[in-house]
Image (cartoon, rainbow, N blue to C red):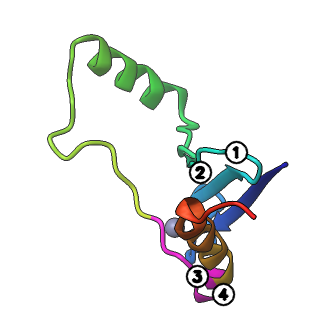
């Protein structure tokens, strides 16, 4: 059975969201973090980015955005931390 935890950024933009997934029955305890990438709605900006990409342009800063965790999501994060911390415990 897999678990998924959705986190929405504290700025409340739905363009800033993370989904952390893990499989309870997996022998190897991995947690996957899916980051929603903000889509560009303006077609001309997308074309301009595509042209720059084709010519190998890269931002010196990389393509980053921020995500601010909400304090009320601490319990969801703790569940994931507990899952990872228990990865080396012997099975009962
Ligand atoms: Zn945000």
Distance CA(mark 1)–CA(mark 2):
6 Å
Q: Circle 4 — which element?
A: helix
Q: Circle 1 — which element?
A: loop
Mark 4 = which residue?
72
Observer-side mark, 1 or 3, equals: 1
Mark sitting on residue 70: 3
Of residues 72 and 81, which is closer to you in this image?
Answer: 81
Q: Residue at x 59, y 44 (%)?
A: 28
Distance CA(mark 4)–CA(mark 2):
25 Å
Q: Position of residue 85 (x, y in %)?
A: 53, 69
Mark 2 = which residue?
29
Q: Residue furthest bottom?
A: 71
Mark sitting on residue 26: 1
> Could you tell whether 55 is left or right of 87 in the image?
left
| Mark 2 neighbour class, 10 Å CA radius: few under 14, some 14 to 19, many 20 or more | some
Queried whether the magenta region covers residue 56, the answer comes back as no
> Looking at the image, is mark 4 or mark 1 earlier in the sequence?
1
Mark 2 and mark 1 in contact (Cβ < 8 Å)? yes
Label 3, ligand 1: CB separation under 8 Å: no
Q: Residue at x 30, y 11 (%)?
A: 54
Q: Position of residue 64 (x, y in %)?
A: 34, 50
> Looking at the image, is mark 4 or mark 2 earlier in the sequence?
2
Of residues 27 and 64, which is closer to you in this image?
Answer: 27
Observer-side mark, 4 or 2, equals: 2
């Amino acid at each position: 059975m897999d678990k998924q935890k959705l986190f929405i950024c504290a700025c409340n933009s739905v363009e800033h969201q993370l989904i952390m997934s893990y499989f309870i029955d997996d022998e190897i305890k991995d947690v996957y973090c899916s980051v929603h990438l903000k889509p560009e709605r303006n077609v001309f900006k997308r074309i301009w980015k595509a042209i720059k990409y084709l010519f190998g342009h890269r931002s010196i800063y990389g393509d980053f955005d921020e995500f601010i965790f909400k304090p009320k999501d601490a319990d969801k994060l703790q569940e994931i931390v507990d899952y990872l911390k228990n990865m080396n415990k012997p099975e009962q």
